[in-house]
Amino acid sequence: MRIDGLQYANWSEKIFRQLREGRVDAVHVTIAYHETFRETVLNFERWNRWFETYSDLILKGTSARDIDIARKTNRTAIFFGFQNPSPMEDDIGLIEILHTLGARFMQLTYNNQSLLATGCYEAEDSGITRMGKQVIKEMNRVGLVVDMSHSADRSTIEAADISERPIAITHANPFEWSPALRNKKDDVIQAVTQNGGMIGFSLYPHHLKDKSACTLQSFCEMVARAADTYGVTHLGIGSDLCQDQPDSVVEWMRTGRWSKEIDFGEGSAASPGFPKMPSWFQDNRDFDNLEAGLRDVGMSADEVAAIMGGNWYRFFDDNFGASVP
Amino acid sequence: MRIDGLQYANWSEKIFRQLREGRVDAVHVTIAYHETFRETVLNFERWNRWFETYSDLILKGTSARDIDIARKTNRTAIFFGFQNPSPMEDDIGLIEILHTLGARFMQLTYNNQSLLATGCYEAEDSGITRMGKQVIKEMNRVGLVVDMSHSADRSTIEAADISERPIAITHANPFEWSPALRNKKDDVIQAVTQNGGMIGFSLYPHHLKDKSACTLQSFCEMVARAADTYGVTHLGIGSDLCQDQPDSVVEWMRTGRWSKEIDFGEGSAASPGFPKMPSWFQDNRDFDNLEAGLRDVGMSADEVAAIMGGNWYRFFDDNFGASVP
């Protein structure tokens, strides 16, 4: 089973076909960064059109059962998430509405301070806000997973502790392997995994050791070490693949409507656009490389299967439905 | 089984308890007249709170199966509908979104011309519009029932013919029994029922012969004649009960934001507010009276059961899911 914990591609029939070539059974797809509620609904609408048009390649995923259906019918189940809480605006009632529409992950922050928590690019991390505590409780109730990929350390640790259900870092790597601001320090990963949560390893070059030149072996050795440290059951892939996106999109991701000035985020003035993907992971057809790489660093077939999809499957199955009162 | 095809009460714990006292298994509840999409979502949110707070009395209904659950657990299943297409604004993609959120009926017009069809108070009825034809097709696809209760005659007959699935007049009576502008002429009811559709008989006094003074016997004789004319399988109740609403609400229903001038609708300057309900149907506890009245005019137990709920149950079961391609 193959499940990718995060992608933000410029979706097209070509990519849907590549998902099938790569035998990807499910993928968590970002459908909002800075969108308002109404703009997010337009994104749901666009996907509804794709589900109708490409019903032979993809289907909407709302529970782990949809992954079983996808596998039986040779399709990919698409699960939705937001990288920022902007779709819920300041209205806690929208959490259940968005869950009903299909949202299954929501980051509490995207780089900046939000109404709920602190993003990883802020100078000060004040932790989970008053509203953030209410929102985590409501997300727990309906089955919308807290994702802290772009959050600051204290906020992430507090979220892991406050949340009564496991949370996720859908796409990031250990800071000790590659000290990017977006990667996660040991105590952060410990807090998430000790509470039953997941980390999806990112293939976005800014999160990789040596960036685009990162070797498959280095990446897979990092995964193997993480399995030893945090337990293999808490690990998955969250490729952060942003295939076919123009560079204007990474600018929107970074600045949205919050700034009139350019913000290079993980990039720089010299290299402001999307970075070049590593040679061994260009698109959805390259999951075979990852699987071979994990075996080559000595992981067992069971461990590799768990990381490539089994763990996400279990996590989806446990966390996408309403909490049992 | 008891199913009411339309109510617009000022909902409260009191009314939820009265639904149980009256053994109402399901009710189609209006949640929008002139609301925009976002305002309609706020109404869904308010109901989500009620489903959480009064989970011992009510549950959200999306398919006929929820009526079975309601009956097994001694609760009332609440199904949602709109009396105007305003919630979908000018965006056909919102039809599936609103269906996903729980909408199961949508009137193409409320008294006035809409983007889709002509309302029953317009001087000219130009039939289903270009957009209206597209919208009916999309409503058919997702399983959102076309309701023509407040539409003009030609528009209603065209909708019944264009729609590939049965449509409904959820709340109105035969014009020949009580010649109100909102009641339906024979050819209109024929067009709807011949295509497998339903009419729900209204207990709103402006739709009754002799209004608030209408006798139970007169009402039930009208139902029995309709059974002879149109076939009993096409008949149900759509009480149009607007319990506990202040008169300001009937003004909103009639004028929304479309007019700066007062419009009395079915009322008049002398009696602008909600009319007094007939003595034998004051609220949800009075369905026993209706049932007894129908038996008293000579209908069989099976016919009475079909009209009180069996027919709506079958209609809900057939028409609330996606069409089979």
Image (cartoon, coloured by chain):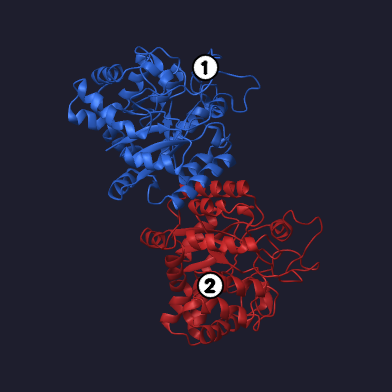
Chain colours: A blue, B red
Quarter residue A4 falls in: top left
**Which chain letter goes with mark 1?**
A
Please rate how many residues cluster around mark 1, counting C-alpha atoms within 10 Å: few if below 14, some from 14 to 19, many from 20.
Answer: few
Residue B226 % position (x, y): 55, 83
Badge 2 marks a residue whose secondary structure is strand
Q: Chain of mark 2?
A: B
Nearer the camera: disc 2 or disc 1: 1
Amino acid on which disc 2 is placed: Ile
Q: Callout 1: helix, strand or loop? A: loop
Q: Position of residue B62 (x, y in %)?
A: 45, 57
Q: Which residue is mark 1?
A: A271
Q: Are marks 2 and 1 in contact (CB under 8 Å)?
A: no
- Quadrant, the N terminus of chain B: bottom left
Q: Is residue A206 above or below residue A284?
A: above
Instruction: In the rendered view, tell whether residue B186 sits above or below residue B28.
Output: below
Q: Is residue A29 left or right of residue A193?
A: right
**Left or right side of A68 for B129:** right
In the image, A314: left or right of B10? left
Q: Are marks 2 and 1 on the same chain?
A: no
**Between residues A264 and A130, which one lies in front from this camera angle?**
A264
| Res B242 visible | no
Residue at the spot of label 2: B237
A294 or A35, which is in the foreground? A294
Label 2 Cα crowd, 10 Å radius (few <14 / some 14-19 / many 20+):
many
Residue B320, given in percent of the width and then of the height, sits at 46, 62
**Number of the label disc, if any, that sits on residue A259:** none
Tell me which amino acid carries mark 1: Ser
